[in-house]
Image (tube, helix red, strand yellow):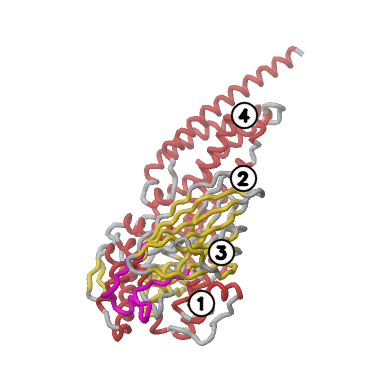
């Protein structure tokens, strides 16, 4: 009996010693992560991973020490003991997760630096080398799968059964894994999708749709012009530029079936007028409809998808290239948006010049795109412009290949509202379309800011919420060409149609313009309650649009709202403070 007691004491002491070793190593690892792993895609793609390499080596050594301690046979047996077993098991889960992350996930992420080399990521002589992406894809997919596994294992730690310090450590690691997951998911998707989309398996043809932000639509701007991009084994060529209104224009009947909900919210225009397909904020739907129109009027050869880009995005990316020659006019990158959205109408002011202007605009945007086929002078600036444009939904993608499209949706590259909102993350959608009488480009002069605030809680835990848009229309009262000002009795008056979407499970309960209620045309899309209404903005005026909602109960948790708005010539700031829990 005495001998058995001695064994238990020795074993207990050994487990305590191993626990101290694991705790010490994990404390060091936690400090390394906090100090050196502000991990995001921007850091990796800007070469920041070079500075991460020594930190990864340090973390691997620390994590290995922690794992050695918790993989000890006596320690592992002790995880089955009552009282202390749950704590020891949680420590073992944390230690093995940190070690696996340091050895299996971080090294392939650090290697992303080589994919950011301009000779790899950006075209040289019109070709992107696809092999580095093919080579990197398996390791990055494995890393992403592993992070998903880690998140599940850490989430399964029973917080109520472990001491506070261990629960806190699990929460810290879970938060860091959430960040890592966003990076691994994007990296894995990119390296898997890029080669086939750029022709590794055979030639691809895409429409490039240029959004004219001076005439607002729900995805940003009217698809004013287009080009055809052909890719084959990474080799890119651009041609087939055209002006939408001049070459495609409108159809007598819908080119594809539209649902009753689409007809209610967007009208038949989305399937009959090429300039109106993106009344819907669903870019894949708009791109597909435009592609059908293009095939009917221009070229029936099958397309593999479409990209949308606006002049603001083009200008940002071209910051890495320098000035571009657009039909004999040299334009600096930061002047490109003003040139294509405003100055071009001064260059061709008369209505009789419309076809000349359309042809010039189509050619100019095609030339700007072609300029991107050469190596940039400043790759960092080009990549920063690309990332910012993607984040602001100024670059949108649609693939005609269903498996690729599913991946693009998961990566958030397709622009539409989420399929469903968690109650703790409600998404409001507010989208505009220019409906000025006889057409205009007055959206160029509209600016705004957006705020969302929480209202009263109901007995069932749902609550009221208000989205407010403070808008300023700085359009002049005279001096604009008719194609900018519009015509008829409402010349110089901007008429905008608002399409408003409640969060999933919520309701749009009303809308006001400058305190006066407006009548809503009701509908449903994206599984969300929605409505539309029109209002006018006179020159040099300000207006306040107020939108009222109810949102579902979020339980005892706070909710972080998001407001999705279309990109404009100048970004509209959005303020969205967290909603405190009801109850």
Which is in the foreground here, disc 4 or disc 2? 4
Q: Which residue is mark 3?
A: 406
- Residue 281, position in %: x, y? 50, 67
- In the image shown, does 122 or 527 lie closer to the viewer? 527
Which marked residue is nearer to the observer: mark 1 or mark 2? 1
User: Disc 3, disc 2: CB below 8 Å?
Assistant: no
Q: Secondary structure at mark 1?
A: helix
Mark 1 and mark 4 lie on one chain; the one further toward the N terminus is: 4
Circle 3: element type: helix
- If you read the primary sequence from the N terminus, does the residue marked by circle 1 or circle 2 appear first? 2
Can you identify the residue that label 2 sits on?
152
Is label 4 in a helix, a strand or a loop? loop
Please, is residue 251 above or below residue 397 in the view?
below
Image quadrant containing the N terminus: top right
- Residue named by callout 1: 270
| Residue identifier under label 4 | 163
């Amino acid at each position: 009996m005495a001998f058995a007691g001695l064994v238990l004491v020795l074993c207990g002491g050994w487990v305590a010693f191993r626990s101290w070793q694991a705790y010490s190593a994990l404390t060091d690892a936690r400090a390394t992560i906090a100090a050196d792993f502000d991990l995001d895609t921007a850091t990796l793609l800007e070469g920041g991973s070079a500075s991460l390499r020594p930190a990864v080596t340090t973390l691997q050594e620390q994590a290995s020490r922690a794992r050695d301690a918790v993989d000890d046979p006596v320690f592992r047996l002790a995880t089955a003991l009552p009282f202390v077993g749950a704590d020891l098991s949680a420590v073992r889960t944390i230690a093995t997760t940190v070690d696996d992350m340091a050895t299996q996930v971080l090294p392939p992420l650090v290697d992303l630096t080589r994919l950011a080399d301009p000779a790899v990521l950006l075209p040289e002589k019109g070709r992107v080398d696809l092999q580095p992406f093919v080579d990197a894809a398996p390791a990055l997919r494995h890393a992403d799968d592993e992070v998903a596994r880690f998140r599940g294992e850490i989430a399964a730690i029973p917080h109520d059964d472990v001491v506070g310090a261990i629960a806190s450590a699990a929460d810290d690691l879970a938060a860091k894994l959430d960040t890592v997951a966003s990076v691994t998911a994007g990296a894995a998707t990119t390296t898997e999708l890029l080669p086939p989309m750029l022709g590794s398996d055979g030639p691809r043809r895409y429409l490039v749709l240029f959004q004219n932000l001076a005439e607002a639509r729900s995805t940003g701007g009217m698809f004013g012009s287009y080009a055809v991009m052909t890719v084959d084994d990474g080799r890119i060529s651009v041609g087939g530029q055209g002006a939408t209104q001049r070459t495609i224009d409108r159809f007598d009947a819908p080119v594809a079936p539209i649902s009753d909900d689409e007809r209610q919210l967007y009208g038949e225009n989305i399937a009959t007028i090429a300039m109106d397909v993106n009344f819907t904020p669903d870019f894949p739907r708009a791109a597909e409809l435009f592609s059908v129109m293009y095939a009917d009027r221009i070229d029936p050869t099958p397309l593999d998808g479409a990209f949308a880009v606006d002049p603001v995005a083009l200008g940002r990316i071209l910051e890495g290239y320098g000035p571009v020659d657009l039909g004999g006019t040299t334009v600096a990158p930061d002047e490109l948006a003003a040139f294509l959205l405003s100055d071009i109408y001064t260059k061709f002011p008369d209505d009789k010049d419309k076809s000349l202007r359309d042809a010039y605009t189509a050619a100019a945007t095609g030339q700007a795109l072609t300029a991107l086929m050469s190596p940039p002078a400043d790759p960092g600036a080009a990549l920063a412009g690309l990332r910012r444009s993607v984040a602001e939904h100024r670059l949108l993608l649609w693939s005609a290949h269903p498996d690729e499209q599913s991946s693009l949706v998961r990566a958030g590259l397709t622009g539409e509202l989420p399929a469903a909102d968690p109650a703790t993350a409600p998404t409001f959608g507010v989208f505009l379309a220019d409906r000025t009488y006889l057409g205009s480009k007055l959206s160029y002069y509209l600016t705004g800011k957006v705020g969302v605030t929480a209202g009263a809680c109901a007995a069932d835990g749902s609550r009221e919420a208000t989205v407010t848009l403070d808008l300023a229309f700085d359009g002049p009262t005279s001096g604009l060409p008719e194609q900018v000002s519009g015509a008829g009795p409402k010349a110089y008056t901007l008429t905008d149609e608002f399409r408003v979407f409640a969060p999933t499970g919520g309701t749009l309960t009303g809308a006001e313009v400058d305190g006066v209620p407006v009548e809503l045309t009701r509908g449903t899309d994206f599984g969300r309650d929605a409505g539309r209404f029109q209002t006018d903005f006179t020159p040099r005026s300000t207006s306040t649009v107020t939108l009222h909602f109810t949102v579902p109960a979020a339980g005892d948790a706070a909710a972080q709202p998001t407001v999705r708005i279309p990109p404009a010539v100048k970004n509209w700031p959005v303020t969205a403070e967290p909603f405190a829990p009801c109850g």
